[in-house]
Amino acid sequence: MPLSRDRRIKAGIVGYGRMGKIRGACLGRRNEWELIGICDIQNHGMGCDVPVFREWSGLLSAGPDAVFVCTPNRRLPEVVMDAVSRGIHVFCEKPPGCTLEDVIRMREAEAAHPGVKLKFGFNHRYHAAVQDAKAIVDSGRLGRVMWVRGIYGKAGGSRYDQNWRNRRELSGGGILIDQGIHMLDLFRLFCDDFEEVKSFLTRSYWTVEVEDNAFVLLRNSRGQVAMLHSSATQWQHRFMAEIYLERGYLAITGILSSTRTYGRETLRVARCQYDAEGYPQPNPEETITYYDEDRSWEQEIDDFARSILEDRPVTVGGSSDAYQVMSLVQQIYTADPLGPRSAAGELTGAAMP
Amino acid sequence: MKAVVLRDDLREADIRPEPLYAEYKAILENESRRIFDGSIRIENRELLPFDCPNCGKAPVAEFERWGAQYCRCATCASLLVSPRPGQEALDAFRRESRAGRFWEQTFAAATGAAREHGIFRPRLQWLLSIKDRYGPRASVVADYRSKYPTFLEALCDSGEFPQVVSLQPEAPWEKLPLAVRPERRAGPEALLHRTDILTLFEVIERVSNPGEVLHLARELCAPGGVLVLTTTSSSGFEYQLLGGSAPNLNPLDRMNLFSIDALTRLIGKAGFEILELSTPGRLDVATVRKTLESDPDLPGLSFWRYFFRHCGEDAEHTLQEFLQQYRLSSHVRVVARRQ
C-alpha cells in the first residue's frame, strides 16, 4: 500500500559497514526519510542516535516502512525475503546475492507481495554522465549503437586478499560480481540484453579463491557487441565506458565515486564529420562535459521514495534488471570452462612485496 | 553542476577578420564616446548611475574605455559600466547607429559562413542536446532580443521545435534592422509562462538592467522551462589579464561583465536552478597573445609574454582547454531550469 504523502518513510539499515553508512548519510539529507534503526552484528552502529539491533528480525519488527539491505552478498537474499514477506519495501545493495538462484528466490518473494517495492543498488545508472549519455543515445541523433566497451578496474585495496568480497561462499565471485557488474548493467542500459557470452577469468596477482580479472565479450541478436575488462590489478584506478554509434561516439571516463579515485567524471561526445565523398573523417570535433558533483546517491533514493509514496513500479534497478544482469554474470562464470584460475602460478601472491 | 569543453577549429580570424573588425570597432568607438559624453542625440539619453544588481552596492571606478566608466563591484568582482544609458536610449541607438548598420549589413554578411560553422552549428547542437536531456517535449523555443535571423531559421529547419519565436521587447518590428520573418515575431507578452526553452544569446551583457531581464525570463518560462544563456564574464582569462586593454571590451556591447559567482547568484535569485555553467570559449588565449604582440608596453604580463614566445601552439591549445575545464574562459554559457 502506498504511504500517505504527508509523512516520512521510516527506514532501517541492515548492515552498517561502508555502504550502510553511505546510505544512512544520504537518508539524513533527504526530507522524505526518517532513519529509525540499524542492524549490525559488528557494532558498527555504535554512537548512532537510533536504536542498534544485533538481529535483523529485531529491526524489521520495529516497524520500518522500508529497509536498506547492505550486508555481504550471501546474507542479502534472506534479509530481503524476510522483509518483503513482512510487507516492508526493500532497497538491496548490488550484487543481488551470490547467484542467479538468489535473485530468483527474491523475485518469487516479490511476486507474492505485489505491493512491496524491491529495488537494487545499480547506482551507476544515476550518474550524470551516464544519464546524459543515455539521453543522447535515446535521441537517435547518432544512429544505432554498434558496440560498447568498458573498463572498470581498481588496485584491489588494503587487505584485498583478506576481504570477504574474495571469499566465494560470501560473495559469489570476485572482481566481476563486485565491480564489473556495474559495467554489465550499463551495457544493458545501452544495448539491452545479450545472448552470447565469451570470457577469460584469471587470478593474475592476488592470492584469492576468485577471479581478479575478467575479460568478457558479449553479443546480442541485433549484432551489438560489448567488451568488458573488469580488474583488481588496475594499479591506476580506471572507469571507462565507450559507446560507438553509426554517426558518432560517446565516452565516459572517470566516475565520481565515494573514494574519488577514478578521476573526474567526464563525457566526451563527437559526431562524425564526413569528407566530400561521405566517408567519416578521423578525430571529429568533441564536446567534453565535466561533472563536479555526485548526486547519484540522492537521486537513487529519491527514485525509491517516489516508487513507495506514489505506488509506482521500480523502473531502474528493479528485480528484472537484477535477474538479467545476474544471468549474464552466471554465464560469464560458466563460459570459461576452467573457471577462475591462476594465469601463472608462480606469480600468484609472490609479486607482493 | 557540469562544465563543458568544446574541441573544434574556431579561430578568431574567421569570425572577427581584420581589417573589417577594426573598422567596426572604430565606428563603435566613435559612437560610444559620443553617447557617453552626451554629444549624440538620442531619446532619454540621460546617463544613470548603476548599482551591482547582484550585491546592490555602487561599484568602484576602475578604468575608462571609449568614454564609458567601467566600475568593479567590490563584493562580487563584476565589471559594470556606470553611469549608463537607459534601455530606451540603448534600443534607439541600436536601431539608428552606424555601428549597428555596419554590423548587420557588412560585418555579419562577411562573416556569415564562419559564424555559421563556428558558432551557430555548435549552438544548434547544444540546443538539441538540451532538448534531449531536459525537455524532450519542448515545443516553444523563444529567442529573446534575437541578433541572428539565420540562426532562427536553422532552428526551424532542424524540425525539432514546432514553434520558434523571436522576442523583441523594443517593437515596432518595422524599425528594427532585423530580417526576422513575420511569422516568427512576437512581443514578450505573447509567451508569458509558455516558453519551453528561452534563449538569451549575448543579451545580459548589453542590456541596461540585466536583473530585470532575468526576472522577465522567469515570467516567460513555462513551469519547468529551461533558460539557455550565453554571456561574457569578468572572471575569464581575457578580462582578468587585459582589463581595460581587452580588445573586445566594447562598452555598448559589454556593459555588464558578471563574475561567475555573481552570475550564479543572479540566476538563482531570479528563480532558476542551474543545470550547467560552462565557459566553453575558444578564443581567450589567441586574443591575449594577439594583444600582447600588438602592445609591447602592457605592464605586468611578463610571464605571459614568455609563455607565448616559448611554448608554442600546443601549449596554447592546452591552456585554452584548461580554461574551459575550470570555468576560466571569458565566454560563459548556462542552462537553468525554472523552479
Image (spheres, rainbow, N blue to C red):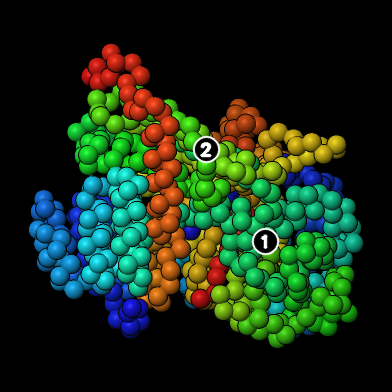
Q: Nearer the viewer, residue A109 or B302?
A: A109
Q: Quadrant of residue A86?
A: bottom left
Q: Viewed as shown, does residue A314 lie left or right of A193? A: left
Q: Mark 2 belongs to which amino acid?
A: Glu
Res. B81 visible in picture: no
Q: Position of residue B284 (x, y in %)?
A: 64, 46
Assign a secondary structure to mark 2.
Answer: strand
Amino acid on which disc 1 is placed: Leu
In the rendered image, residue B259, in percent from the top left (x then y), is placed at 53, 61
Task: Please tell me whether residue B22 is drawn above or below residue A340 in the rendered image.
Answer: below
Q: Relative to residue A314, is residue A72 drawn left or right?
A: left
Which mark identifies residue A310?
none
Task: Report the residue at 40% width, 75% height from top.
Answer: A311
Q: Which sits in the foreground, A262 or A139?
A: A139
Q: In which quarter of the image is residue A40?
A: bottom left
Marker disc for residue B127: 1
Give the answer, above or below, for where B231 lies relative to B338.
above
> Could you tell me which residue is drawn at 32 percent across and 69 percent down?
A113
Secondary structure at numbered mark 1 = helix
Q: Which mark is residue A196?
A: 2
Foreground disc of the pair 1, 2:
2
Tell me how far mark 1 sits from mark 2, CA to CA: 39 Å
Q: Are marks 1 and 2 in contact (CB under 8 Å)?
A: no
Percent x, y for residue A33? 29, 71
Q: Which chain is home to disc 2?
A: A
User: Looking at the image, which residue is at 43% across and 32% down?
Assistant: A335
Q: Where is residue A114 in the image (x, y as percent from the top left)?
A: 36, 70
